[in-house]
Image: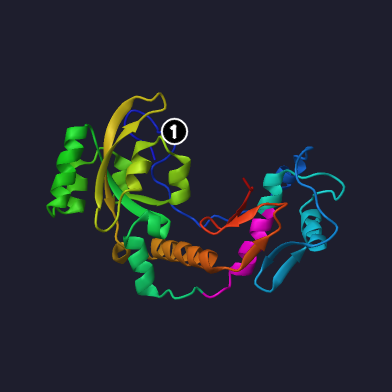
Amino acid sequence: MTWARGTMGGSVRRVNRRLELVLSVAAIAAFTTGCATFSDSDNVARVGDATLTTDEFQAQLTEVGAPSDQLLPGEAVRAQITTWIGEQLADADTPGLDADDVAARYDAGIESSGTVCVSGIVVEAGDTAERVAAELEAGADFSALLEAENLDPSLGDAGGDIGCVTDQQVAEAPEVDFIQAIATLSADDPFATAPLFDQFGDEFAWVVLAFRPFAELSPTDADTVTAAIEAAARFADADVFVDPRYGTFDPTTGEVVALG
């Protein structure tokens, strides 16, 4: 998205997609000492009754181009184990969740759902942003304010749709004000304002952020949100074991992470 007075370092309009961890040939080519080694016995990981043996794991690595006689970076090893675990959990039933549960979790905010979808209006100054937010709080029509106040043509063309942001994106952008503001939104607290900065760190505009309730999501966004919430529920209840030599399974992210 192109903003007035330049382009932000990271586009505010991000469409959340389910993140699939894959092990690239480039990643496993970066072999280095002091990384992970493999035992000749025991299982690398287990999901329920399904096990990933050392031989099976080595075969997976060989299939994507990793020589069997070299050490692998720990990050690459964990990524491949994460991929295998995700495959085992992909078809698992989501415990105790129906459409109403998904909607309630999403509307409660990003801490509950892991994803939040927002719309925005870009204005010139902070006092204008506060006024527009107050009008929205009072029940003003978002589309009318977007047409009257918005300074970003591309955002206007999109109907104000900024997209969906994940908790992982929030964690990766602790110093980006508008991303952190998005993380505060929910159906009970649907509006926020934040400054926008160019690549030089200079403030050039403000954005008024509006939470989009589950009932107002597009079919694509609703499917994305539903998939993320169902995956999180599967991870939380999953019977997963990873050999501590390789890491541990983090149910909040669905990833294998390093110990310590």
Q: Position of residue 27 (x, y in %)?
A: 70, 44
- In this rendering, the answer to whether 202 lies above or below 76 is above
Residue to which mark 1 is pinned: 9
Who is closer to the viewer here, 226 or 170? 170
Q: Residue at x 32, y 52 (%)?
A: 118
Q: Position of residue 149 (x, y in %)?
A: 19, 41
- Is residue 148 shown to the viewer in this render? no
Three-letter amino acid code at disc 1? Answer: Gly
Q: How many marks?
A: 1
Question: Would residue 124 be found to the left or right of residue 165 on screen?
Answer: left
Q: Residues within 10 Å of mark 1 (few under 14, many from 20)?
A: few
The residues colored magenta run 80-93
SS at badge 1: loop
Q: Residue at x 39, y 36 (%)?
A: 176
**Quadrant of the rendered structure where residue 186 is?**
bottom left
Question: Would residue 129 be found to the left or right of residue 253 on screen?
Answer: left
Who is closer to the viewer here, 205 or 43? 43
For the N terminus, the quadrant is top left
Who is closer to the viewer here, 52 or 139? 52
Magenta run includes residue 17: no
Most common secondary structure along the magenta stretch:
helix
Q: Residue at x 36, y 54 (%)?
A: 117
Question: Would residue 91 be found to the left or right of residue 3 on screen?
Answer: right
- In this rendering, the answer to whether 115 lies above or below 121 is below
**Quadrant of the rendered structure where residue 88 is?**
bottom right
